[in-house]
């Protein structure tokens, strides 16, 4: 393997042999199969061949790792899923995004809200990478304000008719199916919409400054008619959609640690080799201060996600705890990427080095799956009992919602 992390607090002692084995397998796969090509994909905004990549990931059990064996997946725990996300995003955020979308935003809702027939049909195909899914929630006019979504699904004698638009959807252009959330006369519900359905169009969104190695696009529905049994029968309101987002946010909390790890290692190696004023940059006090601060924050982020992962596996994790980890670790990784870019000087803006790529990717991660401010308000509501989402005059209490 080409990468060995400085495990400053001996976290490896906390992982099981199976967890470490999976992490190391994913690390080797990312190093050998993906890393040599990531700069070209990012530079030319030419996403990887997701179809081929998903098949390779499926053989390794990377997709939907926490989904039970009976549905064709690896059946691992949430800590293992987190470590998979860490190793993917250490190479590029778009790779972690692919894994999180397939696992948390497509397979998880089918597993938890789908019928047994839906589970038996879709989950094995998704786990093997033979089918690519996407998650249709965000809209052009509504990001954080999911409750105001405009996409609607109306029941008729033959099934459901969907109208609306979803934007900034990972894997939108290549997906074989989509888990789509729409407003009905009985609240927000989840639906499965297959590629090629009349009235359903998928497009690629180009000219992005971030997540350029990934497929991001738009889903549009114009009198899109789907069968009655394509509804996720157990999806009950906005809480169902939020539960999927929380699994994704948990994966992000691990993934961004991987990006920060790569930024730190790149900056450390560069400053040890770069000679200025007849001495390695790493020998100067101000440089060492930056490196030490990065290592401290990464170590704290690892511990935060590790503890959250164990809580997830015990069924004890609460949404505000997930929000805390997502908010804290994304901000940490964003700071590490910016620090590493500075330590590389003029070379810091070159795609020959990873920090600038991580930096712009993490700027997207900072605002998706809940913005930094939204997660602050979720935690704030939890600790005070007051909801500030609608301003201080509302004085609403409780811990409902995200």
Image (cartoon, rainbow, N blue to C red):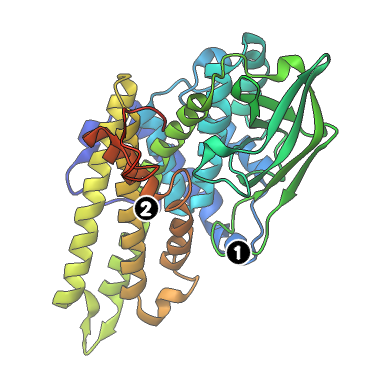
Q: Dividing the picture into quarters, in which one does residue 120 lie?
A: top right
Mark 2 falls on what kind of element? loop
Can residue 379 be seen? yes
Res. 210 image quadrant: bottom right
Placement of the C terminus among the 4 image quadrants: top left
Q: Which of 327 and 7 is in front in this view?
A: 327
Q: Position of residue 68 (x, y in %)?
A: 49, 16
Q: Residue furthest top?
A: 116
CA separation in Å, label 2 and label 1: 20 Å
Q: Which mark is first along the chain, 1 or 2? A: 2
The residue at 23%/54% (across/down) is 297
Residue visible at 31% across and 26% down in the picture: 317
- Residue at mark 2: 3
Q: Is residue 16 visible?
A: no
- Report the side of 138 relative to 177 (left or right): left
**Identity of the residue drawn at 49% across and 53% down:** 92
Farthest left residue in view: 285
Expressed as whole percent of the image width and height from the top left, the position of residue 280 reads: 23, 79
Q: In this view, does 90 lie above or below 130?
A: below
Residue 366 vertical placement versus 170 (above, below) = below
- Side of 370 relative to 72 (left or right): left
- Asked if the residue at tag 1 contacts the one at tag 2, i.e. Cβ–Cβ closer than 8 Å, the answer is no
Quick check: 118 above or below 389? above
Q: Residues within 10 Å of mark 1 (few under 14, many from 20)?
A: some
Give residue 159's position: percent from left, percent from top: 79, 18
Residue at disc 1, secondary structure: helix
Label placed on residue 40: 1
Please state if 142 lies on the left or on the right of 264 as rendered: right
């Amino acid at each position: 393997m080409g990468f060995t992390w400085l495990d400053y607090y001996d976290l490896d002692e906390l992982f099981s042999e199976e967890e470490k084995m999976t992490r190391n397998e994913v690390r080797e796969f990312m190093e050998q199969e993906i890393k040599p090509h990531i700069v070209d994909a990012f530079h030319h905004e030419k996403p990887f061949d997701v179809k081929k990549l998903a098949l390779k990931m499926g053989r390794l059990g990377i997709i939907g790792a926490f989904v039970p064996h009976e549905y064709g997946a690896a059946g691992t725990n949430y800590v293992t899923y987190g470590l998979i996300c860490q190793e993917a995003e250490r190479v590029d955020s778009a790779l972690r995004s692919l894994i999180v979308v397939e696992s948390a935003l497509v397979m998880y809702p089918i597993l938890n809200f789908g019928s047994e027939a839906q589970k038996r049909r879709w989950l094995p195909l998704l786990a093997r990478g033979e089918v690519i899914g996407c998650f249709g929630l965000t809209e052009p006019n509504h990001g954080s304000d999911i409750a105001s979504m405009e996409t609607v699904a109306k029941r008729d004698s033959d099934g459901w008719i969907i109208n609306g638009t979803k934007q900034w959807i990972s894997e939108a252009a290549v997906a074989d199916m989509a888990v789509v959330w729409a407003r009905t006369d009985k609240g927000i519900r989840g639906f499965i919409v297959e590629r090629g359905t009349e009235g359903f169009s998928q497009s690629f969104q180009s000219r992005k400054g971030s997540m350029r190695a990934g497929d991001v696009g738009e889903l549009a529905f114009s009198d899109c008619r789907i069968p009655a049994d394509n509804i996720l029968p157990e999806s009950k309101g906005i809480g169902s959609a939020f539960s999927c987002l929380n699994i994704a946010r948990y994966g992000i909390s691990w993934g961004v640690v991987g990006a920060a790890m790569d930024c730190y290692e790149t900056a450390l190696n560069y400053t040890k080799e770069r000679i200025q004023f007849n001495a390695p940059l790493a020998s100067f006090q101000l440089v060492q201060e930056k490196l030490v601060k990065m290592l401290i924050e990464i170590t704290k982020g690892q511990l935060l996600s590790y503890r959250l992962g164990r809580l997830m596996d015990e069924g004890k994790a609460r949404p505000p705890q997930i929000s805390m980890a997502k908010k804290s670790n994304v901000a940490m990784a964003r700071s590490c990427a910016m620090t590493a870019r500075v330590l590389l000087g003029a070379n810091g803006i070159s795609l020959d080095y990873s920090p600038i790529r991580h930096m712009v990717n993490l700027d997207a991660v900072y605002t998706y799956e809940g913005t930094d401010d939204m997660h602050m308000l979720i935690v704030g509501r939890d600790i005070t009992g007051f909801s500030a989402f609608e301003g201080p005059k509302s004085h609403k209490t409780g811990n409902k919602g995200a």
